[in-house]
Amino acid sequence: MRWGLIGGGRGSQIGEAHRIAARLDGLFIFSAGALDVDAAAGRAFGRELGLADDRSYGDWREMLKAESSRPRAERLDLVTVATPNATHYEITKAFLEAGFNVLCEKPLTMNVEEADDLCATAASTGKICAVNFGYSGYPMAIEARAMIAAGELGDVRVVMAEFAHGAHADANDAENPRVRWRYDPAQAGISSVVADIGVHVLQMAQFMTGQKVTSLTAQFEHSIPSRELEDDALLSCRFDKGAIGRVWLSAVATGQPHGFVVRVFGSKGGLRWSQEHPDQLHFTTVGGSTQIIQRGDAKHPASVAASRLTVGHSEGMLVAFANIYRGIHARIGGGAGAGGERGYPDVSEGAEMVRAVHAAVRSAKDRGAWIDTRTLAAV
């Protein structure tokens, strides 16, 4: 199938990850792109990557107009939006309305109304609108979800999770463009770490447990005072089937390169998964000892299908992203994702996370008040 990319230009970490992941299984051909806010730089980089001159575009509007006019046999099957947060809504909506399937980077939109509108647009057009919560593509995260769904943990009581890294701990790095935009409300929106990494944690908690966040309370900190948006946050949340959640998010956790860890505690047992050690799942039964389940020992069909390498060879983020692309490819072709599941996070999950971000911001402004995420309108 033919694939196009918007954003992810030269030097972009996420752009290269998408280019590798989309093509990893040989399911998509990189056919078109508008890769940079600088039109000339974007066209030049596209040509370097092998795009034809007439499909290496200066901006997304040019790409939309030209690709929409192509014969059906040449049209893109999927467009990925990997641009700054503030642009997600306009670009995603335009391509959906023009009849393209879209994979949008997170967060889906800047506000609740836009998120709801994209849900409605996807429904009315019948097109896929996926959101790149890429960590849910890890095989052992999928195994944890299957184990919990099978009742191996019993009733889920508590979810403890953190995504705490130190990448933005240096106050002298404030003018680095890869850092600065994340704390600029004009580009990042109303939140930094909650919108950037907190959505991954909350989505993973929902993904693993099968429970939805219904309300939350939040405390925000500005460890580097010059930042307009938070660089550290503490959240508590409640889920629709009775579990409670505790979440720590930070960009100033010096010494931690990534720091994404999820723990789920149930009436029969508990699980621990760390993204820095993604091939292992720690499982403990009540009164029993801890068992380390290696990726090669996974027994549930969805996680087995998501695994690409023999045990002993680590799988990572690129394969996790590729599992998202494989799920989208299967759905475009009329099938199911790995293990019979949908295989990718969809627009409704993106909208749920937008609500969670806005609830956290409202709570932090209101001294930690509990906010219902289900009925929330924009802040």
Image (spheres, helix red, strand yellow):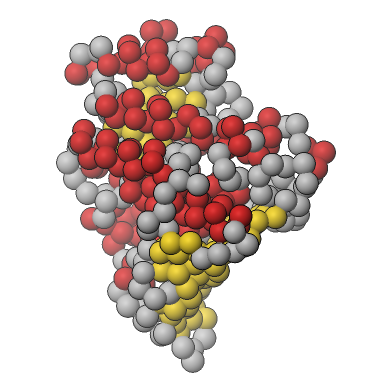
At 27% from the left edge and 35% from the top edge, which residue is drawn? Answer: 121
At 68% from the left edge and 30% from the top edge, which residue is drawn? Answer: 177
In the rendered image, the vertical position of residue 4 relative to residue 56, given as above or below: below
* Rendered location of residue 159, percent (x, y): 49, 71
In the rendered image, the vertical position of residue 122 relative to residue 350, given as above or below: above
Q: Quadrant of residue 329?
A: top left
Q: Quadrant of residue 55?
A: top left
Q: Is residue 198 left or right of residue 144?
A: right
Q: Where is the N terminus found, in terms of image quarters?
A: top left
* Rendered location of residue 295, percent (x, y): 44, 63
Q: Is residue 308 left or right of residue 190?
A: left
Q: Quadrant of residue 33?
A: top left
Q: Nearer the viewer, residue 326 or 160?
A: 160
Furthest residue to the front?
366
At 59% from the left edge and 32% from the top edge, which residue is drawn? Answer: 186
Furthest residue to the right?
172
In the rendered image, the vertical position of residue 139 relative to residue 351, given as above or below: below
Furthest residue to the left?
334
Q: Is residue 116 left or right of residue 181?
A: left
* Rendered location of residue 213, percent (x, y): 42, 63
At 53% from the left edge and 20% from the top edge, which residue is drawn? Answer: 36
